[in-house]
Image: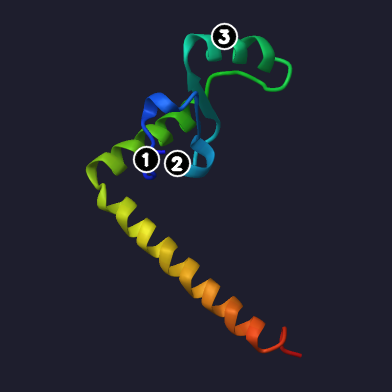
Amino acid sequence: AEACGVPSKAIDVLVGSLEHSLGSVGGFCAGSTQIVGHQRLSGSGYCFSASLPAYATVQAIAALELLQAEPERLTRVSAASAAMHAALSDAMSTAGAGGGAAA
C-alpha cells in the first residue's frame, strides 16, 4: 500500500509473511481491535498458532537488522526484479511472435 500511496488508515487488515520476505517461518495479521478479535474467534479452527522457534526468531530479527543497516539492498532487489520481469516479458513476446516454442 505504501508503494502505491494508499494511506495506512484506509487499510483494514495488514498481513505479512516472514516465510517469503525474510526466509523464516510464519507471518502476522494486524488490524483494529474488532478485526483482531474476529480473527481470534474465527481463525482458530483454520490455523495453528504457536510461538516461532528460537532459531527462526533470531533469523528474522537478523534479517530486519540487516535491512535497516543496508536499505539499499531493497533498492537493488527491486531493480533486479524489474529487470527480470522486463527480460522475461521480452522473451515471451519474442517467443509468441515466432509462432510458439522451438521444435
50 or 98: which is nearer to us?
A: 98
Packing grade of label 1 (10 A; few <14, some 14-19, many >=20) is some
What residue is drawn where x is 44% and y is 28%? Answer: 57
Quarter of the image holding residue 7?
top left
Viewport quadrant of the C terminus: bottom right
Q: Please identify, in this view, whether the residue under mark 2 or under mark 3 is nearer the observer.
A: 3
- In percent of width and height, residue 37 lies at 57, 9
User: Identity of the amino acid at label 1?
Assistant: Ala
Give the residue at mark 1.
63
- Find numbered disc 2 in the image and state the secondary structure of the residue it sits on: helix
- The vertical placement of 17 against 90, above or below, is above
Q: How is the image coloured?
A: rainbow
x%, y% of residue 89?
54, 72
Q: How many marks?
A: 3
Mark positioned earlier in the residue sequence (2 or 3): 2
**The disc labelled 2 sits on which kind of residue?**
Leu
Q: Would you name the residue on which mark 3 appears?
A: 37
Q: Residue at x 38, y 57 (%)?
A: 78
Q: Residues within 10 Å of mark 3 (few under 14, many from 20)?
A: few
Sequence-first disc among 3 and 1? 3
Tag 3 near tag 1, CB within 8 Å: no
Q: In the shown orientation, is residue 100 left or right of residue 53?
A: right
C-alpha span from label 2 to label 1:
6 Å
Q: Which residue is mark 2?
A: 22
Q: Are marks 2 and 1 in contact (CB under 8 Å)?
A: yes
Residue at 53% x, 19% y is 51
Report the residue that reaches farthest toward the left: 69
The numbered disc on residue 72 is none
- x 42%, y 38%: residue: 1
